Amino acid sequence: MKKWIIYFFISVSILSGCQPNLQAKDKGDNEKNKPVLDVVTDFQLSTSEIAAGEQQFIYPVVITLIDPRTLQIVKSFSPQLLGFGVDDKLYQNKVEEIARKLARGTKDIPGYDQQMELDRVDVNGDIVKGNPGILLKESELVEKIIASSYKGEDIFLPLYLLESNYNAEDIPLMNDVTVASFTTYFSSSETGRSRNIELSANALDNIIVGDGDTFSFNTMVGERSVSKGYQPAPEIINKQLVMGIGGGICQTSSTLFNAVDQLGVKMKERHHHSLNIGYVPTGRDATVSYGTLDFKFQNNSGAPFLIRTFYSKNTLTIEIRTTHQYKEVLKKS
């Protein structure tokens, strides 16, 4: 059962004269993809009316978005100034844009969403923990803002902690069965390219992909830099072959794609090269570039699996392994 944990906190007063009323309701984990704790808030910034003689002034309501971890105000705005009550379609679009920018970030400001760094198994068979992911649920935030647009409200960002979903007792058995495999070939005479393939393949070896987990090639392999041992080698950019640090690792990502595509996984991000390549069939590639192009998939098979990589002089083989009990579950329907 995948664990979703929503951030919550002890009641404090944020605005003068405004007292929070938090009710934490333990829902358990009977529903998949539901938060363990659902925090209900009724922070409200009510409309103020001031009468001056026979004239009445009404201050516009304000919606304030708050980071639940730090209690810092992230953004404040008046729904009326964004078109609420005048052009509701325009207002809906602007609210969706606010949620999207907060979740995914902009060119200059990072968003709240953070890709999960998956756990792996070390040489001794012990689990090496990665880092949980963070998800800001855009649709939930939009719903809360729309519902609060008449009266104004303080809204806590719906941030969820994403943890890998597998049973630790299965790990010693995860090498028992190979359910998918794919091999590509390269020339060992291209030393820089070969080294880059080897380094990126090693970075993927023994990664645990739990049920429901999202895998990101760039997150798991990391930045390709000289300090990490990556070397200059030819790479394809805008239909031209140029030299670049880490050239050749697209063979690793493409080999992985062809292995996991044999399973019940959902491809979330995949890009093609601008030129044909020879190590996989046409249309079966997955080009990557750190910070821009990624290869991502979500394990929707219903069972966890292990990524194993095997680098040799002229070949790269990637296998997907699991326990006997999950063998049939992982097969692509």
Image: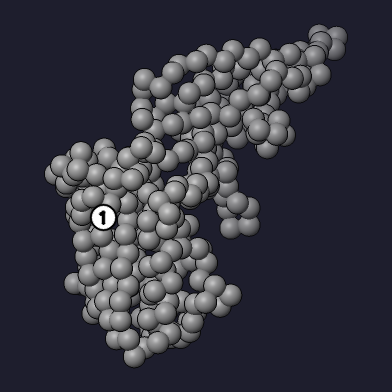
Examine the rendering and report whether any part of residue 92 can be seen.
Answer: no
Q: Residue at x 44, y 18 (%)?
A: 28
Task: Pinpoint residue 206: horizontal percent, then vertical percent.
Answer: 37, 56
State left or right for residue 273 relative to residue 323. Answer: right
Quadrant of the rendered image containing residue 199: bottom left
**Depth check, front residue: 146 or 104:** 104
Residue 284: image x %, image y %? 23, 66
Where is residue 42 drawn, in percent x and y?
Answer: 62, 15
Above or below, 134 relative to 80: below
Q: How many marks?
A: 1
| Left or right position of 92 against 83 | left
User: At 42% from the left edge and 26% from the top edge, which residue is drawn?
Assistant: 34
Residue 98, percent from left and from top: 56, 40
Q: Amino acid at mark 1?
A: Ile
Q: Nearer the viewer, residue 32 or 150?
A: 32
The foreground one among 62 and 319 is 319
**Residue tagged by mark 1?**
320
Name the image quarter holding the C terminus: top left
Dividing the picture into quarters, in which one does residue 9 lie? top right
Q: Residue at x 22, y 41 (%)?
A: 326
User: Quadrant location of residue 48?
Assistant: top right
Give the image's coloring scheme.
one colour
Up-down relation of residue 62 to residue 264 (above or below): above
Q: Where is 192 relative to 221, above or below? A: below
- Residue located 80% across and 14% down the image: 17
Instruction: Look at the image and tell me in which quarter the N terminus lies.
Output: top left
